[in-house]
Every structure is written in C-alpha cells, then in structure tokens.
Image (cartoon, rainbow, N blue to C red):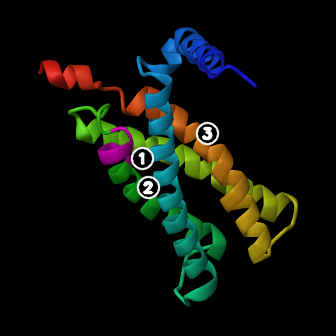
Amino acid sequence: MKDDSAVSGKEKSLVSWIETHFSTLLKGQTLRQWFIEFIRFCTVGLGSYIVDVGIFNLLAYQWNVPLPGDRSISAKVISVSIAIVFSWVMNRLWTFGDQRTDNRGREFILFVAVNIGGMLISLGCLGFSRYVLGLKTQFADNISANIVGLVLGTIFRYVMYRYTIFTGSSADKNNA
C-alpha cells in the first residue's frame, strides 16, 4: 500500500518545480490559476467554435444568400468575424478578466489583429485543401478549416492573448 503523504509530497514537489521553472510563462500565477485560465480559454473557444462553424455551414451550405467569390471562403470570413467579436467579449470579461487593460480600444484592435492572423491560418488550411489538394467537398472544407485550421489558430491565439493583449494584472488594478 502506498503512503499518501509521500505521493502528495511528490506532487507538491512537481508543482513547485513547474511553478519555479516556468514562472515567466505563468506570469506570476500558480499552476492552478493558470489551469483555470486555460480551461476558461478553452470554454470560450468552444463557444466561439460553435458560432464559427454554425454560421460557416449555414452560409456556405444551407442558406441561399449571395456571397462574393468562392462561397466557402466568403462564408468563412463572415463566420470568423462574428466569432471574433463573441470571443473578445467573453475572453475580456471572463478568461482574462483580471488581466485586461484599461485601454479597451488598444485591446480590441490587437485582439482583432491576432484573430485576423488566426483566420488567415484557417483560410490557409482551407485554401491549401481546396486549391492545392483539390478537395472541395463539405467534409474536406470542415476538416481543413474547422479542425486543422482551428488547432493551429488556437495555439497562436492563446499565446498572443496571454502575452500581448491581456497584459494588465489584478495587482495593478488593486493599486489604482
């Protein structure tokens, strides 16, 4: 039978080691605080994903709405744009609520710029699938844009949100 105090001591040592060696990446948070932030980010991302994919499929394949150029590409630009606004509000108020800055305009402009980067990653995956690989089915569009593009774009967005957009701290707000 294992000694529970030894296990918890080892776990505490591992958490302490991670917090010590990754303190710059954690931005002064404990591992637990970072994990909660990350789960919130993923939850907001899931909501944004539902908005994005839902609107994309409605515009590209369900609604008979005239769209300029390639229907799938235009639908993706529109769906991502709507998802960006949803995501900014939720991330600002909930995920990074204690790290938001007082300059909402700067934050929103950076947020939009980062999300344009994320959208370009997704569009790049979609364009590669359609125009290089010649895969032009609904299934192929969804795999390339909404799975491959989503994963690559999510990594990019999280890093940029955390280290360039939501750079305030709760300590700054408490001292103000």
Task: Check disc 2 and give the amino acid type.
Answer: Ile
Please report contact status of discs 3 and 2: CB closer than 8 Å, yes or no: no
Left or right of 64? Residue 70 is: right
SS for callout 3: helix
Label 3 to label 1: alpha-carbon separation: 16 Å
Please report contact status of discs 2 and 1: CB closer than 8 Å, yes or no: yes
Left or right of 20? Residue 70 is: right
Along the viewing direction, whichever of 18 and 132 lies nearer the viewer: 18
Mark in the foreground, 3 or 2: 3
Q: Check if residue 95 falls in the magenta segment.
A: yes
Mark in the foreground, 2 or 1: 2
- The image position of residue 121, as x and y in percent, is 64, 48
Q: Is residue 70 visible?
A: no
- The image position of residue 40, as x and y in percent, is 45, 45
Task: Check disc 3 and give the amino acid type.
Answer: Ile
- Residue sitting at 59 percent across and 11 percent down? 17
Label 3 to label 2: alpha-carbon separation: 15 Å
SS for callout 1: helix
Q: Check if residue 171 falls in the magenta segment.
A: no
Mark in the foreground, 3 or 1: 3
List the residue tagged with mark 1. Answer: 112
List the residue tagged with mark 3. Answer: 155
First-in-chain label (3 vs 2):
2
- Residue sitting at 48 percent across and 41 percent down? 114
Tell me if residue 169 comes above or below residue 72 in the rendering. above
List the residue tagged with mark 2. Answer: 84
- The image position of residue 158, as x and y in percent, is 52, 38
- The boundaries of the magenta stretch are 91-96
Q: Is residue 107 visible?
A: yes
Label 2 to label 1: alpha-carbon separation: 7 Å
First-in-chain label (3 vs 1):
1
